[in-house]
Amino acid sequence: MSESIRPAVTASVAENIPADKNVKFSREAQTKQTGSGRGFTFESTPPERWTSGVIEDRAELEDLLTDVSIRYVASTLGLSNGDFISYVENSGTDPGYDLRNTFTDTTTKPTFNTSDAANPFPTGAMKFVTFAGSVILGDPYESDYFEFSSEALDIQTLAPTGAFTMYFVMSHNSAVAKNGNFPLYVQGTIGSSNQRAEKSFAYFVSTGSPDFLRVRLSGNQYTSIDVDALANVAITGDVNYDATSDNSKAVVIVVTVDENGKTKAYNQRAKASSEDTFPSGRSWKAETFGGPSARDELQPESGSTGDTSYVAEFGYWNKKIDSQDAATIARLLADKYQIS
């Protein structure tokens, strides 16, 4: 049965549910039916049915995140507005995925921000500013970014081989018309010369329609003719998001991918997207967080100098979490950061 076909809680019932409670529904299998006729028999399995709703204690965000593998929360860094960030400890369960910027100068170090007019997170966000160097002129990168590592020189790659889930709470203020939010980056190639370039891995974009939000996952096989789109799912008619007028609007996205590559996304109102499936044999990886690496001289895809991302929180599991939990986490993150 489709996950979208779920018993509705009517207004009269909802009014009698305490604010600190949730109604949880479950499905149960039905008994097979058999019969026979002249010279034949048949067997029928009725579809699962929803059981009566059970009123339970409302799920709390921290309870749902107890087993998260990777988690970064800007407001817990203990920094002041404008401080440079060299290190962010992973508060999840997987070792080896702290965030570091090992450059001795501050050219590429993100900053902690609470006060920018374009920053929708007054409790604090990691601020990443992009410098889109020119391929032709050979300008060096000066973008703000982190790498994944357990030690100062032990650089890791985030590259799941099976099911996974991730979420991000962020905003992207673009120098030109908005083309997405980019929490993770991966290196690929351009054309036939094997030139390295950075591109965003997981991001959302507006398609130009105010009520149409699209979430895309990308791989690292970026060439002049292959942008390596792994999944492309749409959430429609719920959260207004316009490419120009909503520049720097805060957004919550939770993305789930199962072992077969089936992908869904959930927005801050717990609404699910359409479903898409990775092309067979394709996978993804992420090499930098928040912005493109400063170690090469090629510009990021679709990047403009001055593009600024504000990341308030990011989480990742090495599994696909339950769809109801994914939707609930999206809603609770929106409550936490007061995002409508």
Image: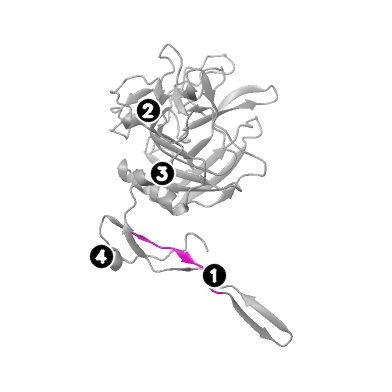
Residue 113: % across, % down: 32, 26
Given contact means CB atoms under 8 Å apart, are the residues at marks 2 and 4 in contact? no
Residue linked to disc 1 = 47
Instruction: Tell me the distance, in whole angstroms, between the alpha carbons under discs 4 and 1.
Output: 30 Å
Instruction: Tell me the distance, in whole angstroms, between the alpha carbons under discs 2 and 1.
Output: 48 Å
How many residues crowd mark 3 within 10 Å: few (<14), some (14–19), many (20+)?
many
Instruction: Tell me the distance, in whole angstroms, between the alpha carbons under discs 3 and 1.
Output: 37 Å
Among the two numbered marks 2 and 3 on one chain, the one whose residue lies closer to the N terminus? 2
Given contact means CB atoms under 8 Å apart, are the residues at marks 2 and 3 in contact? no
Magenta residues, start to end:
22-31
Residue 115 is a magenta residue: no
Residue 206: % across, % down: 47, 42
Dot label at residue 241: 3
Report the side of 218 relative to 104 (left or right). Answer: right
Secondary structure type for disc 1 = loop
Residue linked to disc 4 = 16
Quick check: 107 above or below 252?
A: above
Residue 57: % across, % down: 31, 56
Among the two numbered marks 3 and 4 on one chain, the one whose residue lies closer to the N terminus? 4
Residue 24 is a magenta residue: yes
Dot label at residue 293: none
Instruction: Tell me the distance, in whole angstroms, between the alpha carbons under discs 2 and 4.
Output: 41 Å
Quick check: 251 above or below 140?
A: below
Residue 132: % across, % down: 50, 21
Among the two numbered marks 4 and 1 on one chain, the one whose residue lies closer to the N terminus? 4
The amino acid beneath tag 4 is: Asn
Query: Camera-side residue: 25 or 223?
Result: 25
Secondary structure type for disc 2 = strand
Nearer the observer: mark 3 or 4; the answer is 4
Among the two numbered marks 3 and 1 on one chain, the one whose residue lies closer to the N terminus? 1
Residue linked to disc 2 = 126
Write down the quadrant of residue 112 in the picture. top left
